[in-house]
Image (spheres, helix red, strand yellow):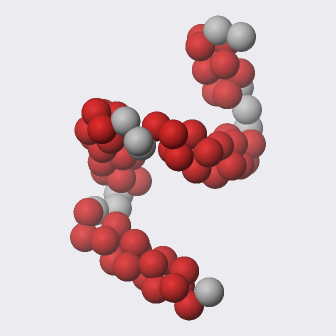
Amino acid sequence: MTHQEIRTALLNLSTEEQKAFVLETLPILARDLVKEPGFMMQLFPVLLGILKESGMDLQQLVQLATMLNGQQQQQ
């Protein structure tokens, strides 16, 4: 499949299927991609844009990350 075919197929999924795909696939992709120093600098503005569109500000993200980190440490 080409990049465009994959993109089209993903965009044609239902919202629930898209959510499941992101949650299942992002951690797998990130393991290798974040090892490339320049990639994180490319990804960061994308993530900030997603946060801005969601209405969550950076302070809320820090609070959420702190909370989730505390939950992981308890497990």
Q: With respect to residue 38, does 66 lie above or below?
A: below
Residue occupying the point 74% across, 42% down: 17
> Looking at the picture, how far across and down is residue 40, in whole percent?
32, 41
User: Total marks drawn?
Assistant: 0
Residue occupying the point 30% across, 38% down: 37
Residue 56 vs residue 22: left or right?
Answer: left
- Asked whether 46 or 42 is in front, the reply is 42
Q: Which corner quadrant of the image does residue 55 belong to?
A: bottom left
| Residue 43 is at least partly visible in this image | no
Find the residue positioned furthest to the bottom: 74
Q: With respect to residue 60, does 20 lie above or below?
A: above
Q: With respect to residue 71, does 55 lie above or below?
A: above
Task: Indicate the quadrant containing the C terminus: top left, top right, bottom left or bottom right.
Answer: bottom right
| Residue 12 is at least partly visible in this image | yes
Residue occupying the point 37% across, 36% down: 36
Residue 73 vs residue 61: left or right?
Answer: right
Residue 48 vs residue 28: left or right?
Answer: left
> Looking at the picture, how far across and down is residue 51, in whole percent?
36, 53
> Looking at the picture, how far across and down is residue 7, in whole percent?
61, 20
Task: Indicate the quadrant containing the N terminus: top left, top right, bottom left or bottom right.
Answer: top right
